[in-house]
Image (spheres, rainbow, N blue to C red):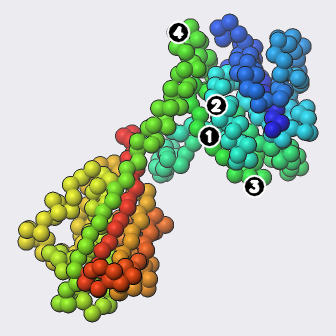
Amino acid sequence: MNIWAVIVAAGKGERLGSYKPLIKIGDKYMLEYSVETISKSNKIEGIVVVCLSNYIQFIRELLKKYDLVKYVVPGGKLRQDSVRKGILKVPETAEFVLVHDAARPFVSVDIIERSINAAVQKGSCVVCVGVNDTVKRVEDGFIKETLDRDSIFLAQTPQIFKRKELLEAFENAILKRLVFTDESSLMEFHGIRPFVVLGDNSNMKITYPQDLELVKNFINSDVDFKKLSEKVYEEEKVRKVQNYFVGIGEDIHPFDKERPLYLGGVLIPFEKGLKGHSDADVLLHALIDALLGASGLDDIGTLFPDTDPKYYGVSSLTLLQKVSTLVYSKGFKIQNIDMIVFAEKPKIRAFKDEIISVISNTLNIDKIKVNLKGKTAEGLGFLGREEGIYAKAVVLLKKEENC
């Protein structure tokens, strides 16, 4: 796989008050850090550095010691102009181009390797980090709404795309006089959905003087940036995994000819219902136990005992509402629900959509998160003899972090 890198170092650094790539951090210039890290990858065939025209000769001399640096070229007025000029120096035989900002000097070898692997497999890659703070959308100085931070990521570099597609997108932008702040925005407009790889906060972009001071403090301390970067990435993976909880619920009720049949909160027209202390909604009882199990709460029999008269004949939708309040109060969000009703009769297909709507409305979640299936026992056992109904539910919860 032929992959080249373009390192963008053509910004004037107006917000920093100095040309960033040639600021000394420790014993090296800022630009050298990125060049050195990318040079360690055996998957990169060559590097093009794009810089301000009046620094070309100095940077060429500076980077002579890095064999992978094949070209140092002047940038353009806009960032996308500079990236395009760099790509034009990349051989047409290169399939992918990795674009990285020189202002992110502490990108790790691990991020470079994972990005390349993802791009080869998925066709593109953008390094992003999640947000830890609660995200607000503000209009006219007032909070308009709170956004779901689980779906919000901050784009970093490297960003990797196929050379031909990236160049075509740049040419299209020139024709339409469009300006984009990064390659992923450009490619999204071009109809390509980039794949995301998790980065880390040590891959920060140096923009303001305080950013530079923070970085210099790290350099002058005993902190190993490489180890810190890997540690942050691993902890982020673990944190995301540990935030998910699975619960399983099951329930069985025998038929009772004297009672109505409720399944999933819906009255089912059938010749017999189910025997139980409440309304005996076997499906909701399984769902309730799954929710309680995933959130680490007591089971349905403990919370709503059949020895308590106040629960006699109670609607299981009322119990589901009570349980959802408990679950949500513990900081959980429902990611999805999958349920099965096992019965020879009645067939639930005709009532499936109504049941899903009732459950999703009760739990205040999107219907797409709720699934329901009906199965028979093929004539076997108590189900096959039409003596009752068995239900099973699986729930995935996500624990919301404190703000």
Contact, mark 2 vs mark 4 (Cβ under 8 Å): no
In whole angstroms, how far apart are the C-alphas of marks 3 and 4? 45 Å
Disc number for residue 197: 1
User: Residue 377's x, y, as percent?
Assistant: 37, 79
How packed is label 2: few (under 14 Cα within 10 Å), some, or many (20 or more)?
Answer: many
Q: Indicate which disc, 1 or 2, sits on the residue closer to the N terminus.
A: 2
Q: Indicate which disc, 4 or 1, sits on the residue closer to the N terminus.
A: 1
Q: Is residue 308 left or right of residue 190?
A: left
Contact, mark 4 vs mark 1 (Cβ under 8 Å): no
The residue carrying mark 2 is 111
Q: Indicate which disc, 2 or 4, sits on the residue closer to the N terminus.
A: 2
Give amino acid for label 4.
Ser
Camera-near label (2 vs 3) is 2
Give amino acid for label 3.
Gly
Residue at 64% across, 25% down:
108
Q: Indicate which disc, 3 or 4, sits on the residue closer to the N terminus.
A: 3
The residue carrying mark 3 is 191
Contact, mark 1 vs mark 2 (Cβ under 8 Å): yes
